[in-house]
Amino acid sequence: MSSAAHSSHETSPDLLLELAGITKKFGPLIANDAIDLKVHKGEIVALLGENGAGKTTLMNILFGHYVADEGQVTVANRDGGISALEPGAPQAALDAGIGMVHQHFTLAENLSGLDNIVLGTEPIFRLKRDRTKARAKLDQLMSGSGLNVDLDQPVHKLTVGEKQRVEILKALYRDARLLVLDEPTAVLTPQEADSLFATLRQLAATGLSVIIIAHKLAEVLAVSHRIAVLRGGKKVGEMQTSDADHRSIAEMMVGREVPASRRTERAPGAPVLHLSGVTIDRGDDRRSLHGVSLTAHEGEILGIAGVSGNGQAALAQLIAGLSKPDHGSVEIFGDVITRFDAHTFAQNGIARIPEDRHHDGMVGSMTVAENIAIEDVRSKEYQKFGFLDFAAIRKRAEHAIKDYDVRCPGPDAQARLLSGGNIQKLILARVLEKSPKLILANQPSRGLDVGAQSEVHRRLLEARENGAAVILISEDLDELLTISDQICVIHAGHVSSAIATAAIDRSELGLMMAGQSKIDAQHAATIPTADQGETR
């Protein structure tokens, strides 16, 4: 879209939405500070910013979940003219044609796609659903948007990409004129992401407006028309996507140049962890593994690529000692492990960065200092005459806060007050300061801004250079291809052979993640260990 189309006055006939002077405070914290944002008809706007920049708060005000302390939201009426959106009224936002697709889908898995879409749109006291009328409208929507999906299938049988289409159709069925997408590609393969972008461009061409909240800059550059950036609760700038690049966006987001992560070639060392024919049968692929064999070496990052829900959780629990295999063996430094518990694995030098940092990574009601020390309270470092040495705990926390740039009021602040990026830095400090022999990094940069991602990658590469083995479980192919030495693909509980990162591209990885392609024998990398050759 031309810049002229985007610089129109608020009375322009193509203006759909305007947020003017939006301010929201939570006690002394200013989450949104006099933010202005306009969205025009047929425009795709990317809303970017660091973790804690105020993006979610702004969208919650738009949808009526929060009420702004100052400012106003106005929306173009369907029949012409502009009116203020009633604050604190989600139904008013829906009636105005504003639809939201959350990163974590809100679908009833036991119902069909059709039932999920129609649910809540018909009178409660109607005795019979008019499925014919609903299906006719949806057929028209699918043919016009390219969002094709089998509406009669139960949602639990649909792929992740198909579930997302159901979510978008659910909004379009309610005659949405503005679609807000929160991290829309977080659980998609590259092919599904490309298909989504094509659909969004097609919908925008018909007049639908889109706001995308995202962290993947390559995708922002591929699909958006305009970019708005928040930092510290303020809108610090806008730019036409055609005038933007990775560097300019990243610098606007974090206020400084963001160094690129660079992996240097090095020969791997001895095996640290070896899984041989491991099977965990839990009744479904999300919680099961089938004959998995892999090896993690010293000084190597082994990436595990896959679409969410294909057995990553089971693999992570096994490596952390939280789950025991039904069949197969697990070796740490050549010794077969027979006792599976987190403490035993931690004593063997295995540390983890958990997938859910809020639920599994920290205790929100405890202080930053207590969270950093929580896994080591039995150590002599924090014991004094049989009691906890809180002075030592606090001293370590002060060092970690400074060294890892954990932005918080201090070591005595409650951990729940930290942003997602700072919680991740807290976990990194706890994990890496112990110089572990193996690090399980499960989705370490999910939902983090470009600055926080860069810091996570730098720390993992530094641990690799110091000789640690790293198992990186991630759904972000850019992350995997940037810092992994080798990559395995997990699909439906099966794990492929490891491939040297230089020997595979995004397209092939995407097909493997979708279960549509397997590794040829020629791709399997043969890399000698420090002691002997080993084919993986």
Image: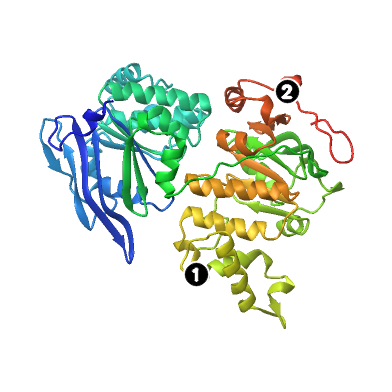
Residue 96 vs residue 382, the one in the foreground: 382
Query: Where's residue 66, x and y in %?
Result: 28, 53
438 displayed left or right of 476: right
Q: Which residue is mark 1?
A: 410
The reply to whether residue 248 is in sight is yes
Residue ID at (71%, 30%): 500
Residue ID at (67%, 22%): 518
What SS does tag 2 mark? helix
271 displayed left or right of 450: right
Query: Where's residue 161, x and y in %?
Result: 47, 28
Q: How many marks?
A: 2
The reply to whether residue 359 is in sight is no
Is tag 2's residue or tag 1's residue first in the polypeptide sequence?
1
Mark 2 surroundings within 10 Å by alpha-carbon count, few (fewer than 14), some (14 through 19), many (20 or more) = few
Residue ID at (52%, 44%): 446
Q: Quadrant of residue 202?
A: top left
**Colouring used for the render:** rainbow
374 displayed left or right of 253: right
Query: Where's residue 280, x and y in %?
Result: 71, 40
Residue 191 vs residue 345, the one in the foreground: 191
Q: Residue furthest bottom?
A: 385
Give the answer, above or below, for where 280 lies relative to 373.
Answer: above
Q: Which residue is mark 2?
A: 523
Residue ID at (11%, 30%): 79
